[in-house]
C-alpha cells in the first residue's frame, strides 16, 4: 500500500510539472501530434485543479497494521500526509506538497525507536509419553464358528480300467 501511495504521488508530481519547453514533441510514424493541450505539444497554460479533501486510516492490532493518508487541495496546491507502521516498530511519516511550479516536495520523518526482538534459543516442544489405557482388553463373546455345510458326497464311482491285459509281442527266449 505504501509503495502505491508513493508511486501515485510521484506520478501526480510528474504530471503537475508538465513538459519542458526545450524538449521537442516526439515524431511518430508520420502522424501529426495531437492537438489536446495536455498532449505532447508545448504549452504554458495549466488547467486549474479541482479542490478536494480526503482522509483514511487503518488500524488492526491483531495483524499489526497501522497506516493512513490525508490530502487536500485548493485547486492549485496539494498538501497531505501519509504514515505507516514499519516492521521495526517505528512509524514513518511523509508530509508533502505538490503544485505546478515546485513539483512534489516531501519531508520524511520517523517516530519511535527501532526495536528488534532478542533471538530466543531453540527449545523443542515437550515430549509426552503415550497415555495409559483406562480400559481392559476386550473379552471375546463368541465361540468358534461351526461349519455351515456338509461333507460333499463324491459324484463319481470307482474307476474301471479301460484297457485289456496286453499280449506279449515277443517270443520265448532262445537258449
Image: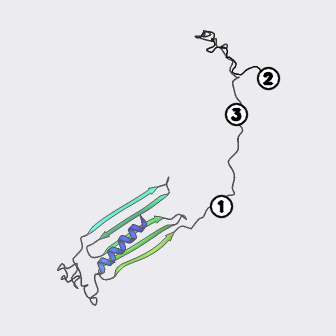
User: Looking at the picture, how far across and down is residue 114, in whole percent?
Assistant: 57, 67
Identify the element where label 1 is drawn.
loop
Question: How many residues crowd mark 3 within 10 Å: few (<14), some (14–19), many (20+)?
Answer: few
User: Which disc, if any, is residue 131?
Assistant: 3
Question: How many residues crowd mark 1 within 10 Å: few (<14), some (14–19), many (20+)?
Answer: few
User: Looking at the picture, how far across and down is residue 153, in whole percent?
Assistant: 60, 9
Image position of 73 with respect to 139: above or below: below
Closer-to-camera residue (107/64): 64
Q: Quadrant of residue 155?
A: top right
User: Looking at the picture, how far across and down is residue 17, in whole percent?
Assistant: 30, 81
Q: Quadrant of residue 163?
A: top right
Task: Give left or right: position of 65 versus 164.
Answer: left
Question: How many residues crowd mark 2 within 10 Å: few (<14), some (14–19), many (20+)?
Answer: few
Identify the element where label 3 is drawn.
loop
Residue matched to label 2: 174
Residue located farthest toward the front when viewing the structure as drawn: 175
First along the sequence among labels 1 and 3: 1
Image position of 89 with respect to 162: above or below: below
Identify the element where label 2 is drawn.
loop
Dot 2 and dot 3 residues touching (CB under 8 Å): no
Image position of 101 with respect to 141: above or below: below
Task: Give left or right: position of 81 versus 132.
Answer: left
Dot 1 and dot 3 residues touching (CB under 8 Å): no
Q: Residue at x 41, y 76 (%)?
A: 106
Q: Exactly how many numbered labels are in the figure?
A: 3
Between disc 1 and disc 3, the foreground one is 3
CA separation in Å, label 2 and label 1: 115 Å
First along the sequence among labels 2 and 3: 3
Closer-to-camera residue (106/131): 131
Residue matched to label 1: 119
Amino acid at each position: 500500500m505504501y509503495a502505491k501511495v508513493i508511486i501515485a504521488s510521484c506520478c501526480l508530481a510528474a504530471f503537475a510539472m508538465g513538459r519542458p519547453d526545450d524538449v521537442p514533441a516526439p515524431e511518430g510514424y508520420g502522424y501529426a501530434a495531437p492537438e489536446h493541450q495536455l498532449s505532447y505539444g508545448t504549452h504554458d497554460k495549466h488547467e486549474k485543479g479541482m479542490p478536494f479533501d480526503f482522509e483514511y486510516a487503518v488500524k488492526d492490532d491483531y495483524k499489526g497494521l497501522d497506516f493512513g493518508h490525508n490530502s487536500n487541495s485548493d485547486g492549485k496546491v496539494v498538501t497531505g500526509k501519509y504514515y505507516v507502521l514499519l516492521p521495526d516498530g517505528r512509524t514513518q511519516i511523509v508530509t508533502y506538497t505538490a503544485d505546478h511550479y515546485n513539483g512534489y516536495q516531501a519531508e520524511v520523518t520517523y517516530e519511535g525507536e527501532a526495536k528488534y526482538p532478542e533471538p530466543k534459543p531453540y527449545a523443542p516442544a515437550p515430549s509426552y509419553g503415550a497415555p495409559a489405557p483406562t480400559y481392559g482388553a476386550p473379552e471375546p463373546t463368541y465361540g468358534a464358528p461351526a461349519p455351515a455345510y456338509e461333507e460333499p458326497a463324491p459324484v463319481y464311482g470307482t474307476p474301471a480300467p479301460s484297457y485289456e491285459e496286453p499280449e506279449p509281442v515277443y517270443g520265448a527266449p532262445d537258449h
